[in-house]
Amino acid sequence: EPEVTQTPSHQVTQMGQEVILRCVPISNHLYFYWYRQILGQKVEFLVSFYNNEISEKSEIFDDQFSVERPDGSNFTLKIRSTKLEDSAMYFCASSHILAGGPGILFFGEGSRLTVL
Amino acid sequence: DQQVKQNSPSLSVQEGRISILNCDYTNSMFDYFLWYKKYPAEGPTFLISISSIKDKNEDGRFTVFLNKSAKHLSLHIVPSQPGDSAVYFCAAFRVTSGTYKYIFGTGTRLKVLA
């Protein structure tokens, strides 16, 4: 069964360092997303990506964040200068198109980011 | 702006009984509602969905009910099994100006007691 894969599973970094989280979405999906979940809190939307551009982003997704689909298979989330409050589980998701909009989200297992 | 709310952070149910998880929303423009289940250290997985034009959708042990006038939906699991113990997220989807966005609730932790 196709699945969304994410690397690394866990990354520990120092505050101020750059971090890149990688995702390989399901191959025939067209919509890509990043969500995050701070421990014990809700799953928060960061950004959606379609047709090689950002289609929507939340207020969390500020200038420190960027996304890229560099080679047609990977979908990356970069945090330029990490802050303590960026510590969270980051989930990548992808979906196929459905009449009237994107379909069901398929999530990866997450990348845990710990900022010290 | 909490558009999707799950007011019960946790729920415990005996095995074999019905589990009812509730979700309220504020935006009447949502097109679809979905339930996702999440085990620890895993990503959320899709469980069941319902279109805003319907009031019920059933899939095996899982049924979702939508009450548009009350802006409320619920997930019924019957009979509940220990393997159903997980965090359940309600999600709402809307198309806004050609973009697509899912909004998740805060989750309800279900514990099914053997």
Image (cartoon, rainbow, N blue to C red):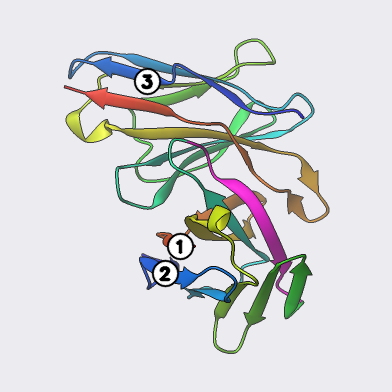
- Residue B26's x, y, as percent? 48, 75
Query: On the picture, is B2 further left or further right than B103?
Result: left
Q: Start and end of the magenta stretch? A: B42-53
> What amino acid type should be assigned to the residue bearing mark 2?
Ser
The secondary element bearing badge 2 is classed as: strand
| Residue under numbered circle 3 | A10
| Residue under numbered circle 2 | B12
Sequence order check, earlier mark of 1 and 2? 2
- Where, by quadrant of the figure, is residue B48 drawn? bottom right
Mark 1 vs 2: CB contact within 8 A: yes
The secondary element bearing badge 1 is classed as: strand
Is the same chain shared between marks 1 and 2?
Answer: yes
| Mark 2 residue crowding within 10 angstroms, few (<14) / some (14–19) / many (20+) | few
Q: Residue at x 70, y 62 (%)?
A: B49
In which quadrant of the rendered image does the N terminus of chain A lie? top right
> What amino acid type should be assigned to the residue bearing mark 1?
Leu
- Residue A52's x, y, as percent? 65, 25
Tag of residue B110 = 1
- Residue A54's x, y, as percent? 56, 34
Q: Residue at x 73, y 33 (%)?
A: A30
> What amino acid type should be assigned to the residue bearing mark 3?
His
Query: CA separation, marks 3 and 2?
Result: 31 Å
Query: CA separation, marks 3 and 1?
Result: 26 Å
The secondary element bearing badge 3 is classed as: strand
Q: Is residue A2 visible?
A: yes
> In the displayed image of the protein, which residue is found farthest to the front?
B114
Q: Nearer the viewer, residue A107 or A63?
A: A107
Query: CA separation, marks 1 and 2?
Result: 6 Å
